[in-house]
Amino acid sequence: MPSSAIHLANVSFAWPGGPEVLRLPSLSVGRGEKVFLRGPSGSGKSTLLGLLSGVLLPGAGEVAVLGERIDRMPGAGRDKFRAEHLGIIFQMFNLLPYLSLTDNAIMPCRFSAKRRLAALECGGTLAAEARRLLRHLGLHDEAMLKRDVTELSVGQQQRVAAARALIGRPEIVIADEPTSALDADAQTRFLDLLMEECTRAGAALVFVSHDGRLATHFDRVIDLAEVNEAAQGKAEAAS
Amino acid sequence: MNRFFFLTLAAKSLLNRRLSAALTVLSIALAVSLFLGVEKIRMGAKESFDNTISGTDLIVGARSGSLNLLLYSVFRLGDPTNNVTWESYRAFADRPDVAWTVPLSLGDSHKGYRVIGTAASYFVHYKYGRRQDLTFAEGRPFENLFETVLGAEVAAKLGYKIGDEITLAHGIGSTSFANHDDKPFRVVGILAPTGTPVDKSVHVSLEAIEAIHLGWQSGARTPLAKMFTKERVEAMKLQPDQITAFLVGLTSRAAALRYQRDVMTYRREPLQAVIPGVALAQLWQVVGVAETALTAIAAFVVFTGLLGMLTAILTSLNERRREMAILRSAGARPWMIFALLMSEAVLLAFCGALLGIAVVYLGLAAGAPFIEAQLGIFVSGLVPGLYDLLVLGAVTGAALVLGAVPAFRAYRNSLADGLTIRL
């Protein structure tokens, strides 16, 4: 029985000397599940993403990703785990300006042998696999692939970032407000393509946004402000 | 996982920031080329200095100090204290272990340039540099009494050519009231430049020195001098009764120490003999203090260049936090962030040092004729070698040490920032 993609139990987190910013009794994401994580600013969203990606360690509780307790792993182990199993898309400026579009997309394969092998299995070569993903994500134009990444529009940059997150078939894709810099049309298009590719790759998608309008596309919606007891406490104290 | 991917990243990242990277490389290159340039000139100067005179086994003069003897006989500086009698000269010149001697007689000058009374053997046996012979740019050695051969600088600065007549002054100052103007000399030869004090010398025969001083006593003309007209002197058989010093070439170099001891223990007259190489080394020790200071300054310039690099990398760190976060999100380990910045520092320093070395050798190759003619420093023989490799290694090594500072900061930042990107 495969364990869930993400399972958090009784997790709490506080910055050194600061108040508790996150307390989650339970939070699970199934394998291949697409979850919309609604989190206004201050809801502990960045902290949660830090915990999921193994950059932060919880003060208490369990963080299991793909059945592995990453909160018990050493730092290097968490780094390796992230490289192998997680694809991450940021809000904007996801690309390194000094690498070509293709090199940006295949970057995770440089840091993880597992993803490199998976990508080679899918596409034959890393570049071919990157091209395949980019094509699926709507970057058909071969001429565009040769362009400097700084010349791309924000929407195009986000597609390259999505290809990078998906290359080598990681089990989980975490997207942190990836569409907030796009207009409404582009948002929907990007989201559809991202969902489609995640489905094709069998990856779970944790899509973080404060914009509830996009929630209808997802299997499930988690409202972080509701499940985060630390934030609730704060909200009650404020009211 | 590609463990050396950070090298690719470093190179591409630097290429992307090529203007600031080029400026950093340039400043390191300038610093290194300054340092090496100073070193090369210094080595060249030392070598040229050591080669001011070559092929001579011993210099013999009146007993004073070995530096003094060297200064007045070779560098044509300072004043000879005493003379060597002709008999003593002959006694040491006629020994069976002597291959040749060159007598030198000093004390007169021409417009500030020293006059050397010598023999024709001077033009055969006086050697400089790597046993290079004196060559004539124009004309020939002196043959008749009132003929002179000028060093290259004397002819060039004073504008003399073959056939010109010059008069000698008594004493060594540039202005002298006691002139030998009744007995002018005709220029018959001009030597090619050597970069040694020979260029600054006016050469006449020993007999000529004798001739112009006939009727002189204690450095002043007596009424008797009028009797010795030029025509009458030319008809006379002149025999010098003393000289200032003489250069000795032995049939075997191994005999030098015995010869030197014999000179030192000569009973008729207090004489001394110096081995040029030994005396030159002593003199260089005196000059060497300035040399050390110059090297120290040049080393500091290199250090400044590296500090500039450190500043450039440190100031770029903040704007590159996003880059580090992106790399980390794609799976880069923190140590790779450290290695990335280290390799940037090393790459910059290595390229800078390499460029600096190239600049020095190109500069030396292009400037060698000028440097050799103007300064008398021989630099064309200098080829890239172990020393340059050491400089390359030292600069790169220093960059490795200095580069650890920004690399460690970036490492710590990337641990603290994690995947969050602050705009």
Image (cartoon, coloured by chain):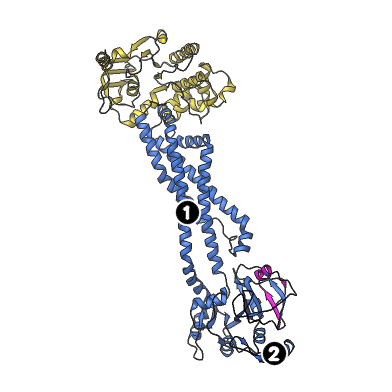
Chain colours: A yellow, B blue
- Badge 1 is on which residue? B390
Residue A113: x and y, percent? 42, 29
- Amino acid type, label 2: Lys
> Are circles 1 and 2 on residues that touch, CB within 8 Å?
no
Chain bearing mark 1:
B
| Quarter of the rendering occupied by the N terminus of chain B | top left
Q: B258 or B149: nearer the eye?
A: B149
Q: Within the image, what quadrant is residue B162 found in?
A: bottom right
The reply to whether label 1 and label 2 mark residues of one chain is yes
Residue B236: x and y, percent? 71, 91
| Lateral position of residue B115 relative to residue A98, left or right | right
Give the secondary structure at mark 2: helix
Q: Residue at x 50, y 18 (%)?
A: A155
Note whether B6 is above or below B218 in the view shown.
above
Q: Which residues are magenta?
A: B135-157
Residue B363: x and y, percent? 59, 53
| Lateral position of residue B269 relative to residue B167, left or right | left
- Amino acid type, label 1: Leu
Sequence order check: which comes first, mark 1 or mark 2?
2
Q: Is residue B134 magenta?
A: no
- Badge 2 is on which residue? B226
Chain bearing mark 2:
B
